[in-house]
Image (cartoon, rainbow, N blue to C red):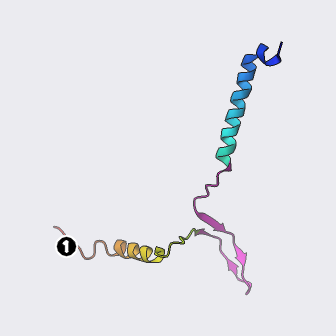
């Protein structure tokens, strides 16, 4: 008799453990850093201390700067030119 035919529940348990392990391994291998990079503090060439900061990812789209400026203008002037209701 075969070992696995005698212990079919053990076989199913091992199968489930392997499936769960595979799912966890695939889920952990994806790189989801959210688009921000931390720049660590350092000393510049003149000996001055530079604080650490978070650098956001920038778009490679050629219209990205125009879109960003248009959005900034819209939200800065949003209530300024509208007629105020009383």
Going by the picture, which residue comes out furthest to the left?
86
Residue located 66% across and 39% down the image: 23
**Residue 28 higher or lower than 2, as above or below:** below
Pick the front one: 22 or 32: 22
Going by the picture, which residue comes out furthest to the front?
1
Pick the front one: 3 or 51: 3
Residue located 68% across and 49% down the image: 29
Question: Relative to residue 82, is residue 67 drawn left or right?
Answer: right
Crowding near the residue tagged with mark 1, few <14, some 14–19, many ≥20 C-alpha atoms within 10 Å: few
**Residue 23 higher or lower than 64, as above or below:** above
Pick the front one: 73 or 2: 2
Question: Relative to residue 33, is residue 82 drawn left or right?
Answer: left
**Residue 18 higher or lower than 47, as above or below:** above
Q: Position of residue 77 (x, y in %)?
A: 32, 75
Question: Relative to residue 36, is residue 40 drawn left or right?
Answer: right
Question: Relative to residue 36, is residue 73 drawn left or right?
Answer: left
Residue located 28% across and 72% down the image: 79
Extent of the magenta region: 29-55
Going by the picture, which residue comes out furthest to the bottom?
46
Residue located 57% across and 68% down the image: 57
Residue at the disc numbered 1: 83
Pick the front one: 80 or 4: 4
State the SS at label 1.
Answer: loop
Q: Position of residue 76 (x, y in %)?
A: 36, 74
Q: Position of residue 15 (x, y in %)?
A: 71, 28
Q: Would you identify the image quadrant in which residue 43 lies?
A: bottom right
**Residue 36 higher or lower than 31, as above or below:** below
In the picture, the quarter occupied by the C terminus is bottom left
Q: Would you identify the image quadrant in which residue 48 lies?
A: bottom right
Residue 12 belongs to magenta span: no
Residue 45 belongs to magenta span: yes
Q: Position of residue 42 (x, y in %)?
A: 72, 75
């Amino acid at each position: 008799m075969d070992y696995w035919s005698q212990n079919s529940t053990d076989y199913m348990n091992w199968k489930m453990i392997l499936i769960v392990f595979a799912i966890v391994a695939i889920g952990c291998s994806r790189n989801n850093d959210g688009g921000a990079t931390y720049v660590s503090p350092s000393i510049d060439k003149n000996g001055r201390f530079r604080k650490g900061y978070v650098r956001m990812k920038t778009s490679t789209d050629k219209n990205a700067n125009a879109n960003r400026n248009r959005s900034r203008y819209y939200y800065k002037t949003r209530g300024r030119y509208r007629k105020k209701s009383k």
